[in-house]
Amino acid sequence: MTARRDTRWRGLAATLRSGHAAARALAVGDSRSFVRALFLASAVRLAVLSELLVPRSLQDVAELTGATRPERLEAWLDVGVATGELARRDGRYRVRGRRARALADQDPVLTAHYRSLLDYQAGVYADLADRLRDPPGDGRPDLEEHADVIAQVSLVAAPFVVPYLADAVAELHPARVLDVGCGTGVYVRALLAADSDVQVDGIDLATGVVARGEAELRAAGLASRAGLHVGDIRDWTPDADRRFGLITLINDIYYFAAGDRPALYERLATLLEPSGQLLVVTETRFGSVASAHLHLLLACQAGAASLPTESELVADLERAGFEIVERHRLVPTEPFVGLRARPTAPSAAS
Ligand SMILES: C[S@@+](CC[C@H](N)C(=O)[O-])C[C@H]1O[C@@H](n2cnc3c(N)ncnc32)[C@H](O)[C@@H]1O
């Protein structure tokens, strides 16, 4: 016993003398977080955590997951136990950790977050050498392949965005609103809730996401006041003389190439009523780990996506003939901004 303890202390002393002891200690902490995140992300993929709200044997979990390699399944479950996300008692496993319990309860934002880690976030770093040598325009097809998860992940901003939209609607009383890149329709529903008379159109590229958004509107009895359209806003034309008192661009301006944004704003100005306003909400570049990471993910996509800086956002709107009515930071810890702008002169087409 004494000899073994001596060996341990000698090992620790050797590590401390190695020169990077503090960095190694930090790396151990990072590694624990990384393993926990990988465990939870894989658990979301296996869709197994809700089943572990009640204790299950290895055999039960093998049946639920279709696993035919019980030794591997047990090794994976033991990672869950070691990270504190699962508990094992009398050979049975159940969810224990706070994150695992929230995922077992189907928290939609957390589920999308963990799903996105393996679906598209890790790949950017794993294949970075290739991405750094892609020809211009080439890159990952994440928006096409993971539109659903991307739309779900952006719901994390909803508690900050919904009140901002409600204030804009209360001030402007628009008869009709257009939500560009409406995704799941979360903000279409928020706009409808903000004013019982407002009509809302939403447009998005992603067919499946729009179909689910439409089904939710129908289920909520809101379909008569809202229309969701599949299309690209750059060439979408609304019915005849339909004009909007408010046009919103929420979490999507970064998908448009930086050089194309003024032209997009000019086009949206032609869809506004004379007193109409444009409302843009977006994470901006610089100021947090999340914004730097998102900018990298965007920069590695096919096309020319990128986060704008706040001053680029303002300059592009001004270049397109808008003046800024007001701008805010919507999230205390993030460079996540909301701003409203109105055309300085009525558009020729409005
Ligand atoms: C990150 S999601 C945000 C969805 C929603 N606005 C939200 O905040 O929850 C961005 C959305 O913009 C849509 N989008 C990107 N480019 C578009 C375009 N050119 N026309 C219409 N929709 C577009 C994508 O399909 C995607 O659903």
Image: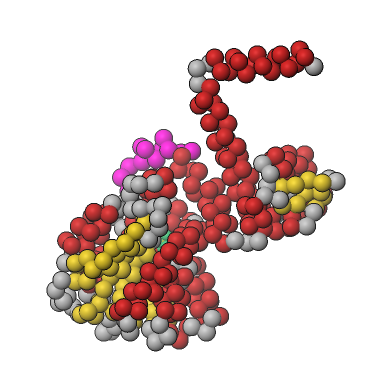
In this view of the protein, can residue 143 be seen by the observer? yes
Question: Could you say which is closer to the camera, residue 45 or residue 52?
Answer: 52
Horizontal placement of 184 versus 273: left or right?
Answer: right
Q: Quadrant of residue 339?
A: bottom left
Is 176 a magenta residue?
Answer: no
Question: Could you say which is closer to the camera, residue 224 or residue 311?
Answer: 311
Q: Position of residue 83 (x, y in %)?
A: 66, 41
Quadrant into which the C terminus falls: bottom left
**Where 210 falls versus 90 (above or below)?**
below
Q: Residue at x 27, y 54 (%)?
A: 310
Is 134 a magenta residue?
Answer: yes
Question: Could you say which is closer to the camera, residue 14 or residue 137?
Answer: 14
Q: Residue at x 71, y 14 (%)?
A: 6
Q: How many labels, in total?
A: 0
Q: Position of residue 320 (x, y in %)?
A: 18, 64
Q: Residue at x 44, y 74 (%)?
A: 190
Q: Position of residue 328 (x, y in %)?
A: 31, 61
